Amino acid sequence: CFCQLQGKIDECSCNIHTVDSFNNVKLFPRLRSLLIKDYFRFFKVNLKRPCPFWSDDSRCAMRYCHVEYCEENAIPAGIKGHKTKHNKYTSNTQENCTEHHNLGYLNKTLSEKAQHDMEKWAAYDDAQDNFCVEDLQGEGAEYVDLLLNPERFTGYSGESAHRIWRSIYLENCFRPKETFSFNPYIQTAKLNNMCLEERAFYRAISGLHASINIHLCSNYLLSSKNGLSFKDPNGEWGPNLEEFIKRFSPEFTNGEGPNWLRNLYFVYLIELRALAKAAPYLEREDYYTGNESEDYDTRMAMKDLLSLIKKFPDHFDETTMFRGTKEAQKLKYEFKQHFRNITRIMDCVGCDKCRLWGKLQTQGLGTALKILFGGQFDYDPSGNLMNKMEMQLQRNEIVSLLNAVGRLSTSIYKLDDFRQMLR
Ligand code: FAD
């Protein structure tokens, strides 16, 4: 079977089989119950920003692309306006009020000019670490309940969808050297002409693409009757094996399908490693929504999840990337710029539902890259933070990272369902 993958995951020492048994038995069930908690289900996003790269080719009006926004009173009070316990600028807890008061005192002792410079540099420092461009303060950002808007088949396809993927692979991925091809999509065999970091970039994007396409195959509209609303109470949704074969079998994909599936495992390992690395920070987070018992349950569920992830035997080793030299630092800068562009391209996706999940998953991956390569989360051998700068993750970064891992974990789980069906 083409999807019965074996051996080591590319660029890693970990086996496919190790991930399958860890994910399908241990991680997936835990994530499934964690992600329905209030803290993780409400995601703030701006779906109204115009496409910065080409004039909008009119939004898709398909009913399955519709996104349902939250009523103001459905959003837990603790989430509105709350960032994180560690973020001292906005919060409604007593502790942060005191801190804010102290900051106010400090501010008074600084000249206005020095204060302005400090703010500018704080924003600059934070922006330097970020792999995503997402402004949640601007007009149009709203809360979406992810449980009411599941990622699934929407019918979004054709030139609009192809333009997005083409522009990601052609203009915003690194390209193999010494080869010129009219095909915008990269062939796996040509990856040998690229360095580790460039290959890793491509594999991460391709893995994300594979995950999105597995979701639409496993949550496909099997029957559609006229006059269904987007909530389609009568619609039948479920796995579509033919669609899966068409998208991933070697026969229909020029031999590439199984490689794309392998890339799914690669991006999974990247995000898993980011969670392990940020675990000491995430364990201290308060997951505040204002509902005491729910918040306690969320903290316990996070502790349980993180201790499981820390025990994963074969994590991705990010220290092999961007080592030392000036060249490596230049490459890291380009890596970040390419990735930021991809987060901007999400504003060009012509289907709101796809745009929502595209933004969430690129922001989640961007957060993972920030944790792995931003320098804020580096520990010395005894487990102390090496960087004295205060590390920071905004609530939306935590929500997108955990949901992004949830999406990849579900894809690996669903892949196993397709394997069983093919048998
Ligand atoms: P596409 O998936 O559009 O791929 C284009 C080309 O890319 C292929 O011909 C192939 O050469 C290459 N390719 C395909 N897969 C990979 C891979 N994994 N790695 C490397 N190269 C690859 N549709 C939905 O129904 N629901 C969604 O939620 C959804 N979300 C989307 C989110 C985003 C950000 C985008 C851009 C699209 C989304 N789509 C979604 C559309 C979906 O991804 C496909 O574009 C669409 O179904 C058309 O598929 P296709 O077979 O023409 O190939």
Image (spheres, grey):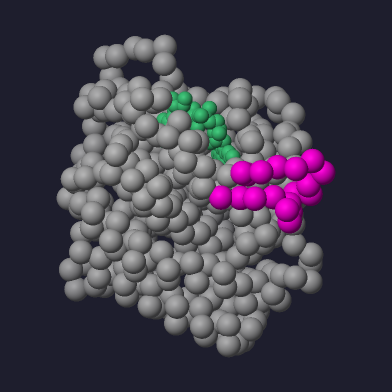
Depicted 102 relative to depicted 345: above or below: below
Q: Quadrant of residue 29?
A: bottom left
- Magenta range: 221-238
Residue 409's spot in the image, x, y percent? 41, 57
Depicted 330 relative to depicted 40: above or below: above
Q: Residue at x 79, y 67 (%)?
A: 72
Residue 141's spot in the image, x, y percent? 71, 53
Q: Residue at x 74, y 29 (%)?
A: 58
Verify whether residue 39 appears in magenta.
no
In this view of the protein, can residue 74 be seen by the observer?
yes
Q: How many marks?
A: 0
Q: Quadrant of residue 220?
A: top right
Residue 208's spot in the image, x, y percent? 44, 43
Identity of the residue furthest to the front in this view = 423
In the image: residue 240, left or right of residue 156: left
Q: Residue at x 50, y 25 (%)?
A: 166
Residue nearest the viewer, comparing 74 with 219: 219
